[in-house]
Each structure stands twice: as C-alpha cells, then as structure tokens.
Amino acid sequence: MIRIGVDANGGDNGVNTTVPAAMKAVKDFKDIEIVLFGDEDKIKPLLTNNERITIVDTKVTMDMGEHDPVRAVRKMKDSSLDMVMYACKNKEVDCVVTNGPTQCVVVAAHLIIRRLDGMDRVALCPLVSNFDGNPRLILDVGANVELRPEHLGQFAIFATVAAKKVLKIENPTVGMLNIGSEPGKGREIDKESYDYLSNLEGINFKGNIEPNQIIDCPTDIVVCDGYSGNIAIKTLEGTAKTMGKMLKQEIKASFGGKIGYLFMKKNLERFKKRMDSSEVGGAMIFGVGAPVVKAHGNADSYTFYCAIRQVRKMVESKIIETVIEALPKTPKEEI
Amino acid sequence: MIRIGVDANGGDNGVNTTVPAAMKAVKDFKDIEIVLFGDEDKIKPLLTNNERITIVDTKVTMDMGEHDPVRAVRKMKDSSLDMVMYACKNKEVDCVVTNGPTQCVVVAAHLIIRRLDGMDRVALCPLVSNFDGNPRLILDVGANVELRPEHLGQFAIFATVAAKKVLKIENPTVGMLNIGSEPGKGREIDKESYDYLSNLEGINFKGNIEPNQIIDCPTDIVVCDGYSGNIAIKTLEGTAKTMGKMLKQEIKASFGGKIGYLFMKKNLERFKKRMDSSEVGGAMIFGVGAPVVKAHGNADSYTFYCAIRQVRKMVESKIIETVIEALPKTPKEEI
C-alpha cells in the first residue's frame, strides 16, 4: 500500500478541493491509502466514501499570503501543512500532496522532511505544457534565487531520474536556461555552470536553451536558478493568460466573432486545454527525502486528483531510492 | 531638417526592407533627410524616388549571426553599421536606424557614438505591446548581464524622459522587475536596487513588477538587468509565437474550425495585431549621445518605416538634450 499524506486545509478552497480529489483517487487506485490532515468538522460532511481514507484533525491552516515562510513553518506546528510534513518525516505516510503557499511548502519540506544526502539545495520543479504535448521538467523555478554549478548538476541528476520514472523517457535530455544558445553566453555563473554540466556524468546535456524555446523546448529537462526560472515561468503564465483574455475580447467584439465561436467552440476549448497545466498535476519538490507535490493554490478537484496520481507514481517508481543511487557517492561538504 | 542615418544593408533582407521604408518616410515627413549607408548597386534600382535621400556606398555588411561583436565592430569599420555610427558621431546625421545584429548595434553605439556623461551603462529598451494597447518601456533587455542599483536609476531617469517625449505620458510610472511584489523579494542586488529606486528623485517609482504582469503592466516603465529582462522578453515572444501556432493548428484541425475561421477572420487578425510589436517600431538604445533605434532583424518595410518614424520623434522632441538636463549633475566616477 502507498500511503499518501494530503494537506486537506490548503489552497484557495481547502477541503472542497482536496476531499473530492482524495475520494476519486482511492476509487481509481486500489494500491493507495490517504491520510487527510485537516478540519474534521468540514471534511466529514464531504466524505461520502471513507474506504482507505483516514482523517487527522487540525483546524489550523497556513495563510496563502504568508510573507515569512520560515517563521510560519517553525511556529505553526499544528497547521495541516506542518503536520503532514511531520507525518512524512516519521514515515507514517510515504509522500505529501499540498496546494498550500509555495514558499511555505518548500521551507516545510526542507526543514521538516530534510534534504537527501548529496542534495545541497531543494528545487521547485513544475511540469510545463509544451507545443508537442509532452510536458517538460523545469527547475528550479523559485526555491533558490542563486545557485552554484554543482547545485544545477544535482538538479539535473534528480530530474533525469524523475523524467525516466514519471514521464517514462528513456534517455532524458537536459538543457540550461540562458540568454543565448552559444556556450559563452550569459553571466559568469552561467559560463561556469555550462562547463560543469558539459562534464557531468549521468546526464545527457545538450547545451543552452533560450527562453523563447520554453514552451516549444528541444530538451526534456531545463535547469536554471530559481530567480531566472521564476521569471520565465511567470512570464509564460502571464502571457498565456493575457493572450487568452485578448482572444476572448476580440471574439466577443463583433457578431461575426460570436457566430464563428459557435463553430469553433471545441477547437478553442482544445486550445485552452493545451495551454492549461492542470492535466499534469503539480510542481514537484526535489531534494528532500520523500516525494512532495505542490498543486496550484487555485487548483480544482481534478487538478488536485492529478497531483495525487503524480505523487503515487513517484512513490511507486521508487524515485527517491533511484536518485540516491544516481547521486555521486562521496559525501560532500555543505556548499 | 532632421538627418536620419540608415544602415541600409542590415537585417535579414537588407535593402529590400530598408529602401522602401526610407522612401515612405521621406514622403510622410517633410522635415527629414535620409542617408542610406549601403550597397549603391543594390539600392539604386529600388530607389524610385530619391528626394531628400542620399547614398553612402558600402558593400560590407555585419553578419546577422556575428558571435564576437566587439571584434566585429572594431575591425569592420567599412561595414554599413560602423559607417552610419561614425556619421552620427561626426554629426553628419542626427540619429541612426538599423536592423542589424543586436549585440553589434549595442557595441557599435557604445564604442563609436559613446556614452553620455552621467550614463554608466547602455540599455536596450523595446516598446512592448500591452493588453490596454499602450506600449511599455522595458529596459535593459540584453545589453548588460549584471547591473548596479545606480545603473537602474540612470535607466529609470532616461526612460522617464523617453516616455514623456515619445509616448506623451505626463508623469510616467516606473516599476522594477522582480520575482515577488513585496520590497524584500529577490536577490540581494534586487533589494538594494529597490531601496535605491525608492529614494531616487526625478522618477515616479511604484515598486516591484512581477513577470506575469509584463504584458498587462501597471507601470509605464519597467527596469531590470539585461539578463532578467532578456529572459522575460524572450519568454513572452516565444509563448506568444507558440500559442499562435497552437491556435492555428487547432482551428485547422476540424471542418467546424475552418468554417468558424471564416466568420471571425477579422477578429483573429486584430488579435494577432495586438500581440505584434511591429506597430511600435524598434528597440531604443539608451545611454549614448544620439538616438539609435534597432528594428528586428526580420522587420518588414512597414516596421522599419515605424522605426524611422520613432527615431525622428526622438530627435524632434530633443530627448537627448532633456536627458542630459535630467541626469544628476555631479560628475560621477566610472562604476
């Protein structure tokens, strides 16, 4: 049995999102048990089927707008987020799914579950929809504003294992986000990282990836520091959203547009779906000792279900055990 | 008379783009003269109207894929790009328009025209299309991979003048690109820059701008280092382009889509136009002693014409003279 811990109070809609998702997950996957960490009074009325679902009661919830994640994680030990992380640390569950505030999730995973030996940093790694329909792993997109070449190397190794295990890609390719395609491009640190990744064993490094390739990407994995990655991911999201708004506005602007819409409604829905990342679940937290998946704060039940499905796959495919094997064996100093 | 120097050999299509653009410009603006620096043998057959247009012959062209811009600019003094820059330095023309390779344009402007006193760096500043139809000034997007707070301050002052003069905005607002909206977000340098800009006189600073706001932006101006700005701009371009490809593919995928397209053809054309930056000309090079506008390498004649119109406005509105007034007066050490 795979035991999945769910932060049931998290996200913009709390139990209304997480509980239906958990019920669908236990129905679809007979090899999982779910522990819901959350407000029992709110969960129980929604829990029409409690086969392989248990509740650990807590009314305390991490605020979605929390500005001081380290303080919050340290102080709010009775929050649903902290509690599910402690349960994971204590091996009461095998993994964690949450749609809580991103920085709190990263910090809680880091401080409570703890980093793996050989991983000096924790990375936030979403699966990003791409033109060809195959999602890409992009990391880090916000856990660390600055990173050394060795950290990118560890992320590349971790993501290579994840791409093999979760996306079933045989020999995943790795690129590095940079402002030009040639090796000498970017800041000094980018040149160092390029050299480091070029010589790193165990990854299939293909060189620089320019930001305009991010949703039509020639590699399976893109590594970057969390500052650059966050800019790329947020620009992508903002552009997609604003373009969607513009398209809607233009279609509605004339009678011809409205008639045309009736004919191509399905086409436009498919278009929207291709840009939507919900199908692929959530962002993975790489670097700690257990699989953690963070869904969007505004994820709906289906998206949250996909995140549960994703974390199940990560446990089933023994991603952490394989990463431990893949990481360089010599114990490293803290960098 | 405003004397405009045009690098006629530049860009992907050379004289076929630049010559028709120049002819349209002299027809529309009676107060300009154009000097075309380029291959006379190729220009003459296209030049059906040479009123207020003269040619300075050179067959040499900067390669669009040039990897070593400093070397190229230093060695290729007989290239159309170097020649138009020297003509500007020697006051034979008042300003420059080119669609040559970006880094070579930045380097040539820097090395040949030279920086203004009080500007320690040169910035590349495109006008970026936005949801509300008003373009934003975003700088730097690629001239400098790393910048100090003072440099961002100088860029903010320069862009404030440009927004007033070129976009006719009375009291332009300034934001700083960052990965969070609160003051303490980002790298150490971002925190320093935030403090510096908050206390800088002569600009209307409004705080951090998150990357997802870049095409639906609450400020008129966004300052950033060239590495971050380049990531944002290229991600925006890549996302817009790929989404356009996806939309086309989905519409073509069914009979209903094709019928619908006939009804909403005009709507979709307007949508495309809104995302297209061609109407607003080119990227401005800020920091040197004369207006320089760099159009896209693949700009068509109309876009190149818009770039000529833009540089004319920069000269007419005395942008450089006003910036000199606006910059802090005390002579500064090279930073």
Image (cartoon, coloured by chain):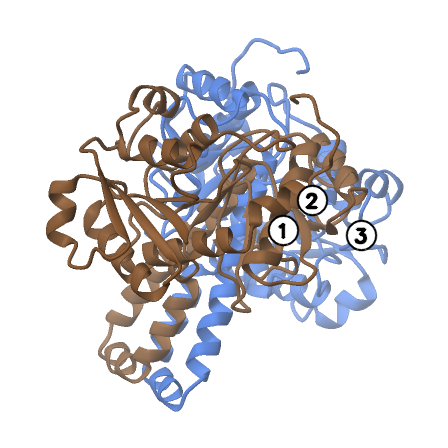
Chain colours: A blue, B brown
What is the distance, in whole Å, between disc 2 and disc 1 at their CAs? 8 Å
Query: Looking at the image, is mark 3 or mark 2 nearer the viewer?
Result: 2
Q: Amino acid at mark 1?
A: Val
Say which element carries label 1. Answer: helix
| Point 78% across, 42% down: residue | B200
**Quadrant showing the N terminus of chain B:** bottom left
The image quadrant where one finds the C terminus of chain B is top right
Amino acid marked by disc 3: Met
Mark 2 closeness class: few <14, some 14–19, many ≥20 residues within 10 Å: some
Q: Are marks 3 and 2 on the same chain?
A: no
Instruction: Report crowding for label 3: few under 14, some 14 to 19, many 20 or more residues within 10 A (C-alpha).
Output: many
Q: Chain of mark 1?
A: B
Can residue A140 be spotted in the picture? no
- Say whether residue B279 is left or right of residue A117: left
Q: CA distance from mark 1 to mark 3?
A: 45 Å
The amino acid sitting under disc 2 is: Ala
Q: Secondary structure at mark 3?
A: loop
Q: Residue furthest top?
A: A330
Q: Is residue B162 left or right of residue B89?
A: right
A160 w.r.t. A67: above or below: above
Give the labeled residue for mark 2.
Answer: B326
Circle 3 residue: A62
The residue depicted at 24 percent of the width and 77 percent of the height is B258
Q: Is residue B294 above or below residue B118?
A: below
Number of the front mark, 1 or 3: 1
